[in-house]
Image (tube, helix red, strand yellow):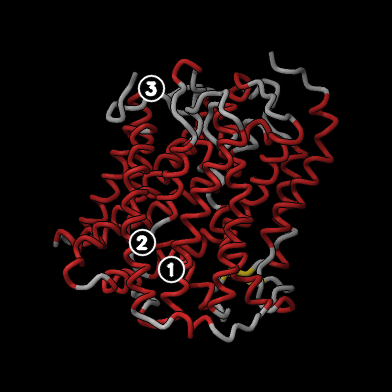
Amino acid sequence: MTTALEVERRSIDRIPEAERHGHPRSLFTLWFAANMQITSAVTGALTVLVGLHPLWALIAIAVGNALGGVPMALHAAQGPRLGIPQMIQSRAQFGVYGAVLPLVLVVLMYLGYFASGNVLGGQALAEITGMPVDLSVLLYAALSAAIAILGYRLIHRFGWIASLLSVVVFVYLTFRLLAGHDVGAVLAGAELDFPAFLLALSLTASWQLTFGPYVADTSRYLPSSTSVRSTFWWTYGGTVLGSVWAMSFGALAYAVSGNAFKGREVAYVVGLGGEALVLPLLFAIALGKFTVNVLNIYGGYMTVATTLTAFTRRIALSPAARIGYIAFVGVAGGTIAVLGRGDFLSNFVLFLHFLLYFLTPWSAINLVDFYFLRKENYALEEIYDPDGRYGRWCAPALVAYFAGILVQIPFSHVEKLFTGFLVPALGGADIAWLLGLVVPGAIYWAAMRGRIRAEPVRG
């Protein structure tokens, strides 16, 4: 039996049944901790910033996370069944080479979110230690890499600790926020601005959808006998409860304080605790961001490895190669963070939001394939072979994927980057993510159902 402090040996290869362990309830604490952090609170503040009444903003936060959490948690249920990382399973839909396209986009997503996490966590660390900010950012990235090297067990153990700390901190901060302001007056007189409601709904649903490439990575060691229902609900409960709480806090904080919160989120949160609790709250912010930062580098290295091994046909990585991939992602993310602490990183985060339009069609195709077409029946050894059952390219999947991107364009809205021509007619609302889920999934199902029905059953 390995311990949490032993270096993980597995990488992109399948987890043998003898090495499976754990209970899906660990997914609850992991994803609760990943969502109970400062970036979630900032996202919640945006729902009020777009012009929505605070009461309707709270409703949009709850509904958006409840909707977006469904596909997110459905991906989690793939982990125990297949025992492989999330993105390598995409080869079964797109082909071994065809899957490189969504893989490259996911690599950019991981690097961007890891870099932005290093900036925020590094700034908090600098306040705690007095070190220069750039050095703190690099140290924060290195600590994230160290946890990722140790791997799966420590990530789940750390998620439990961070989840407990998050509850204590956010209970206290929520009490201070509610006790120090007349929240009832802020929530009174609610009038619905439906376009703004749709925009807020898309912001919060999108938050959950971006977790799609992560979740099977964190559930693949569970025994294959773990039920889909159990994996789904533990993941869904953690991610939705954590995000709704943190986002609601952010929405109310902005509603009662306005510019005192906007752009000064960390200082505002720390200020709620009073001078005596400045350091503990800074530590809590740094630690809270750490959970999702580790997930970014952990999933990032496996996605980079999955991309490159498509052409080398490697099934597993040596311990040295695994550490090398993690180091590569860590150095790249840390460098981007240091060089881009100013406007560049802000613009890069906007670009990452733009990537959501490319990731949503992938999610739809992957879920339709797993739940409705192949129904968990995969020849896993052939996922690593370009000459195997899944081939080099799958034209119907690629057509469905690009159709899913194109259909979103008229409805897409990314501030400073792009606004689709139908967005003004919807009052600025972005409903592209709905079309990005429905259209490519339907096209892929129609095109592939006959071909997949003819495949031999595994085993």
Density class for disc 3 (Cα within 10 Å; few <14, some 14-19, many ≥20) is few
Quick one: SS at disc 2? Answer: helix
**Which residue lies at the image location 83% right of the left edge and 23% below the top edge?**
454
Tell me whether the residue at label 2 lies in contact with that at label 1, contact meaning CB atoms closer than 8 angstroms.
yes
User: For the view shown, which residue lies furthest in the top direction?
Assistant: 459
Give the number of the mark in front: 3 or 1. 1
Along the polypeptide, which appears first: circle 2 or circle 3? 2
**Figure check: 112 above or below 350:** above
**What residue is disc 1 on?**
249
Give the Cα separation between the discs numbered 3 and 1.
44 Å
Give the Cα separation between the discs numbered 2 and 3.
41 Å
**What residue is disc 3 on?**
318
> How many discs appear?
3
- Counting from the top left corner in percent of width and height, residue 108 is at 49, 50
Q: Amino acid at mark 2?
A: Phe
Q: Quick check: can you spot residue 382?
A: yes
**What residue is disc 2 on?**
170
Q: Amino acid at mark 1?
A: Phe
Q: Amino acid at mark 3?
A: Ser
Q: Quadrant of the N terminus?
A: top left
- 365 to the left or right of 233: right
Density class for disc 1 (Cα within 10 Å; few <14, some 14-19, many ≥20) is many
Q: Quadrant of the C terminus?
A: top right
